[in-house]
RNA sequence: GAGCCGGUAGCUCAGUCGGUAGAGCAUCGCCCUUUUAAGGCGAGGGCCCUGGGUUCGAGUCCCAGCCGGCUCACCA
């Protein structure tokens, strides 16, 4: 018999013993009157004498994560959410049935207890148990108490165990939830309406990416899991909602890495009558206020580097940044031969057949992006790589667009939206041509979206923020898998 | 997709030159009514990721594969 089976059998044996004693091993309702964290906050600082005098009753529940028994008494540590509290189980104070339950307890079991708060000889804040309810039996042992669970594969595959064994992981996901809640309330306070748009699209659009395909049987059509909500949110601006946002999943059928999960969470928001400059200010306010609210500071530590989110952040135009970082003459932006030569000199691998904008962009991504550690708005992107953005009035080869970089990564992408339906049709057609030329990620022509624009979309600015990467930044995590509860992995062999 | 690293008890890890598979925690038994990595004595527990090969003999060497991590490529 292998070891897991042996431990499982032992626990099933205890489960039977509970059942024979009339204790259901998988009980029903338990009236929790207190939370460990709240008790600690309210009474955790009180002295032994004060606690003895006040005799504060309490009723809590949780999972047993530590058990120290000696003869006719023992201590258990209950995990209640993010908090742990010690309980004292003394035979003299318990009913016969409760004593019997105590004898059958294992690490991992769930119990509910009622008792009185006190302080032990060693000054530990503790519940002296008078009543004990058995709530649920764990058949599998918890990971080792000292090292916990560290095997990354098991941590991701069995996140439930990771969350039990590693309180700091638990905390990351609490923080994640708080950040998203803070973003949501920031936007709602500013008059945004939260909406939900389709996850299944007949035509994937709003980003350059490879989609997942699925099939609807009754309709007899293929559908695509959305790569972005953008085109639907803009339809809503056309429909007359002046401020909308959506926080939801996007799906992209591409590689997996420390910064890519096939499904990831995206915030997109759209503001009618505004332009991308307004969004620069809004983004500074949003991220710095969330940082203050959740982390208590706008100066954060990310993977050993200090990042200052105190506004204002640097604004740097795409072309200027490219030339300044590499000491290039602006003529490289106009002449393909010069751009190729610059790429070669800078050791940026480029396709010699590629068009000018592609060569320039490759140089940009290779040389500028990784150096943008402090928050930086890169503005005025070329039109060829911005098929949904409005042209700059002063220079129609550029767009009213910015991307926000922090810690060398793109965190946000925003622009004044293209609301000219005729220009949008031309851009789609250019994209379609790029697609025919072999670019699988170029946009498809979305006739219904064009129809919507023809009904008239007010001037609008829109932005997308990658929530997972933002959470990584705010929780100092190097891998997206550590901020996504159930990251995508290859299926394991049936356990 | 490529390169590098890893996979040994439930967990965390050792395993030398190829020679009967080890520790701590966990589990089981006994002792113990204020411990906190409780303690003491004793015991059980292994598909060494999978499949081939070399060898008298493979956890160890070779080949192929599976799973994971990191780096790179693509991307947000």
Image (cartoon, coloured by chain):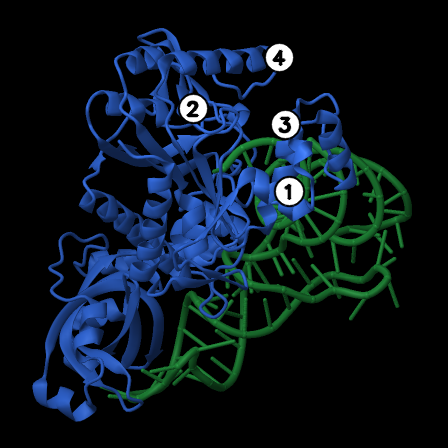
Callout 4: SS:
loop
- State the residue position of label 2: A388
Asked which secondary structure carries label 3, the reply is helix
| Residue holding disc 1 | A323
Q: Is residue A163 left or right of residue B70?
A: left
Residue at left 16%, top 76%?
A: A42
Q: Residues within 10 Å of mark 1 (few under 14, many from 20)?
A: some
Q: Earlier in the sequence, mark 3 or mark 1?
A: 1
Q: Which residue is mark 3?
A: A358
Q: Do residues under tags 2 and 4 come within 8 Å of each other at their CB atoms?
A: no
Residue A27 in the figure: left or right of residue A283: left
Query: What residue lies at 24% left-to-right and 60% top-to-bottom?
Result: A18
Q: Is residue A7 visible?
A: no
Name the residue that disc number 4 marks: A437
Label 2 or label 4, whichever lies nearer to me, is 2
Whole-Å distance between the Cαs marked 3 and 4? 14 Å
Return the disc, 3 or 4, that comes first in the chain's sequence.
3
- What's the distance in space between the residues labelled 1 and 4, CA to CA? 30 Å
Kind of element beneath mark 1: helix
Dot 2 or dot 4: first in sequence order is 2
């Amino acid at each position: 018999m292998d070891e897991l089976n042996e431990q499982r059998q032992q626990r099933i044996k205890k489960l039977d013993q509970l059942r024979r004693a009339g204790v259901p091993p998988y009980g029903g309702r338990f009236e929790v009157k207190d939370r460990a964290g709240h008790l600690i906050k309210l009474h955790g600082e009180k002295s032994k004498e004060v606690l003895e005098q006040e005799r504060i009753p309490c009723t809590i529940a949780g999972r047993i994560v530590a058990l120290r028994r000696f003869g006719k008494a023992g201590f258990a540590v209950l995990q209640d959410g993010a908090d742990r509290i010690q309980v004292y189980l003394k035979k003299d104070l318990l009913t016969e049935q409760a004593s019997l339950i105590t004898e059958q307890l294992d690490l991992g079991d769930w119990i509910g207890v009622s008792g009185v708060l006190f302080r032990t000889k060693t000054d530990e804040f503790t519940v002296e148990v008078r009543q004990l309810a058995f709530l649920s039996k764990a058949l599998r042992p918890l990971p080792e108490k000292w090292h916990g669970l560290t095997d990354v594969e098991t941590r991701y595959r069995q996140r439930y165990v990771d969350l039990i064994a590693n309180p700091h992981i638990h905390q990351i996901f609490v923080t994640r939830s708080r950040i998203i809640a803070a973003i949501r309330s920031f936007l709602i306070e500013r008059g945004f309406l939260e909406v939900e748009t389709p996850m299944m699209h007949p035509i994937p659009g709003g980003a350059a990416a490879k989609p997942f395909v699925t099939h609807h049987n009754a309709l007899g059509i293929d559908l695509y899991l959305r790569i972005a909500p953008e085109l639907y949110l803009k339809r809503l601006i056309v429909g007359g909602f002046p401020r909308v946002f959506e926080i939801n999943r996007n799906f992209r059928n591409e590689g997996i890495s420390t910064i890519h999960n096939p499904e990831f969470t995206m915030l997109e928001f759209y503001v009618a009558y505004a332009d991308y400059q307004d969004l620069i200010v809004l983004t500074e306010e949003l991220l710095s206020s969330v940082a203050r609210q959740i982390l208590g500071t706008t100066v954060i530590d990310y993977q050993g580097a200090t990042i200052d989110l105190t506004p204002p952040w640097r604004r740097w135009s795409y072309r200027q940044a490219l030339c300044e970082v590499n000491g290039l003459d602006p003529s490289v932006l106009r002449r393909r031969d010069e751009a190729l030569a610059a790429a070669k000199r800078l050791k940026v691998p480029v396709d010699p057949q590629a068009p000018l904008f592609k060569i320039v962009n490759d140089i940009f991504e290779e040389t500028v992006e990784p150096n943008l550690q402090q928050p930086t708005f890169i503005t005025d992107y070329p039109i060829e790589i911005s098929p949904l953005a409005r042209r700059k009035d002063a220079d129609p080869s550029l767009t009213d667009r910015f991307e926000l970089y922090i810690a060398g990564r793109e965190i946000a992408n925003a622009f004044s939206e293209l609301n000219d339906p005729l220009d949008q049709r031309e851009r789609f057609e250019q994209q379609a041509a790029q697609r025919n030329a072999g670019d699988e990620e170029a946009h498809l022509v979305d006739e219904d979206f064009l129809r919507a624009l023809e009904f008239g979309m007010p001037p609008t600015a829109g932005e997308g923020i990658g929530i997972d990467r933002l959470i990584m930044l705010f929780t100092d995590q190097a891998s997206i898998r550590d901020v996504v509860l159930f990251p995508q992995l290859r299926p394991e062999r049936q356990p």
